[in-house]
Amino acid sequence: MTIHVFELPDLGEGLTEAEVVKWLVAVGDTVTVDQPVAEVETAKSIVEVPTPYAGVVHELHGAEGEVLAVGGPLISVADDAVVEPVTPAAPASADGERYREEERAGTGSGNVLIGYGTPEAGGGGRRRRRKGARPALAPVSPAVPDAPVRRVPLVTSPLVRQMARQAGLRVADLRGSGPGGLITRRDVVAAIEADKAPAPAPAPESAAPVVPAPVAAGVVDPRTGLAESARVPMSGFRKSVAAALSRSRSEIPEATVWVDVDATELVRLRAAHPEGPGLLSYVARFTVAGLRAFPELNGLVDAERGELVQYDGINLGLAVQTDRGLVAPAVLGAHRLTTVELDTEVKRLTAAARAGKATPVEMTGGTFTLNNYGSLRVDGSAAIINHPQVAILGIGRIIDRPWVVDGELTVRKITQLSFAFDHRVCDGGAAAGFMRIVADAIEDPAGAIARL
């Protein structure tokens, strides 16, 4: 009997741990390659982790609610059981080895799970080094000689397979760009970009609330002289938020501008078409127009190479408040969508984020963030840029305020836009130009849509 120990994979740049939310298997269960074995939470996502081994579950290395270290054992599988192989003549040990090989391949960071402020590639953070070139993987020959020959998809990473499943893609239909035709994370991301009909994910169970730890009687804070009433442990999610926001504040020389906007005509347009797009979807469309005019705001700073990167396309991040905290999933390919299509994606994405089921690429792929803090009934905010992005636009609540129109004082629907930007990528002129495009479109939405 051989025991295969599956280690918790690297779930995102800079992340070192994950919490086991729920085990999907028990000791003694028979599992197959790519079968989800656990739900783990980190970086604002609850994600099912599949096993690269087939066999019988020998040991679960942790209890539900326990935080495990990345690279530490997650589950042990014994291969002495009779199980259905994934492909003929491909033993479980070979699947596991090819999985580890793919995770080491040079495809960006190699990570598929990410959270607030986690970079997907490029400008900063640590990078893995390959110790040597590996040979191309040869397709496995069919076990039955008379069977028709077919191409076996060269994808062995369970996490890459999971990305494809969540997006409604068949790995057999994908063309790999890795060595020997290996299907990598980038290939799945490219396919998702091309196919805008991802499969809906099932609603997850609610995450267990964080229970404050009891404090020993008589513990007094020396600074304030007050007794401590409770200590609440920081979850992996909250730690990742704290790290990302601290990094944003320490690395980005940000500046903030704001403008009051007359949204009366936008509110009228929405009221005239109650079944049409929501207000946020219109603002999203106007934001995309502003980023097209000022592409330097839709990029990142590669500090290591001293370069300003601009993206050929816009993945519009949306700040979404969930039970677990604030997340910023992205509408992928927002520059290709109409206002109606944007509205559909905004509603779908916010629902998926609140359910904890936004896909990894949606969580990591944002190039710019739009924050509707008006939904929290506040007027303005000096938002923190979602590193490694370089700007964030916020919109406050729309309220009745006195306003001068054609020299006459009247009551109008007014909102405030606030815009924080990385001063390394542009100066105030570009920021003001972007803001005026969005503000002018809000004040004359019909004319703006006709021009877009």
Image (cartoon, rainbow, N blue to C red):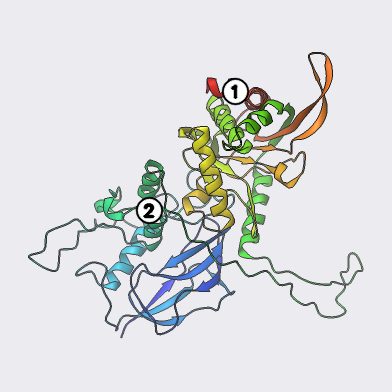
Q: Which numbered disc, 1 or 2, marks the residue that appears first in the sequence?
A: 2
Q: Residue furthest top?
A: 407
CA–CA distance in space, label 1 to label 2 = 36 Å
Q: Which mark is residue 15?
A: none
Give the residue drawn at x 36%, y 55%: 105
Quadrant of image for the N terminus: bottom left
Residue at 25% of width from left, 51% of height from top? Answer: 181
Query: Looking at the image, can residue 78 be seen?
Result: yes
Q: Residue at x 30, y 47 (%)?
A: 177
Mark seen at residue 446: 1
The quadrant holding residue 218 is bottom right
Nearer to us in this view, 281 or 34: 281
Residue under label 2, please give it: 168
At x 55% / y 24%, what residue is drawn? 449
Residue 273 image position (x, y, % from top left): 60, 33
The residue closer to the viewer here, 337 or 45, is: 337
Q: Are marks 1 and 2 in contact (CB under 8 Å)?
A: no
Query: In the figure, 141 relative to 393: above or below?
Result: below
Crowd class of label 2 (few under 14; some 14 to 19; many from 20; radius 10 Å): some
In this picture, residue 139 sits left or right of residue 335: left
Residue 201 in the image: above or below residue 228:
above
SS for callout 2: loop
Outermost residue toward the left in this view: 146
Q: Position of residue 274 (x, y in %)?
A: 61, 36
Identify the secondary structure beneath mark 1.
Answer: helix
Q: Residues within 10 Å of mark 1 (few under 14, many from 20)?
A: few
